[in-house]
Amino acid sequence: MAVTRLKRKDRYNKTVSRLEVKTLKLATNLELGSRSKQSTKDQLAKNNAVLAQLEAKA
């Protein structure tokens, strides 16, 4: 089967939808008591703990 080139509108939609998915994956909606509760072993949590220690010293 030959590969068909997407029309401009379809290429644009493909790019936009890909970027939307990427944005949604990066977004962190952490709600209290939900299944998406942030892990304490998470690198972000570790970084926040170190920053909190540094702020306490200052």
Image (spheres, grey):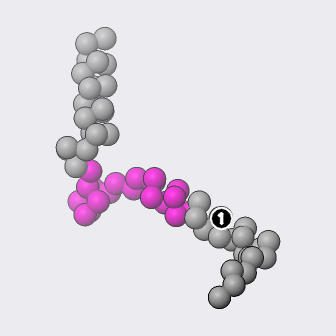
**From this viewpoint, which residue is outermost toward the right?**
8
Q: In the rendering, at what x and y percent does residue 55 appear?
A: 31, 19
Q: Nearer the viewer, residue 43 or 34?
A: 43
Q: In the rendering, at what x and y percent does residue 24 appear?
A: 49, 60
Residue at position x 72%, y 70% in the image? 11
Compared to residue 27, the image places residue 7 above or below, namely below
Residue range (magenta):
20-38
Q: In the rendering, at what x and y percent does residue 54 appear?
A: 29, 18
Residue at position x 52%, y 56% in the image? 23
Residue at position x 69%, y 84% in the image? 2
Compared to residue 47, the image places residue 54 above or below, namely above
Element carrying mark 1: helix
Q: Would you say the magenta stretch is mainly helix, strand or loop?
A: loop
Q: Which quadrant of the structure image shows residue 41? A: top left
Residue 39 drawn in magenta: no
**From this viewpoint, which residue is outermost toward the left?**
41
The residue that disc 1 covers is 15
Say left or right for 37 vs 9.
left
Quarter of the picture holding the N terminus:
bottom right
Q: Which quadrant of the structure image shows residue 33? A: bottom left
Q: Disc 1 residue type?
A: Thr
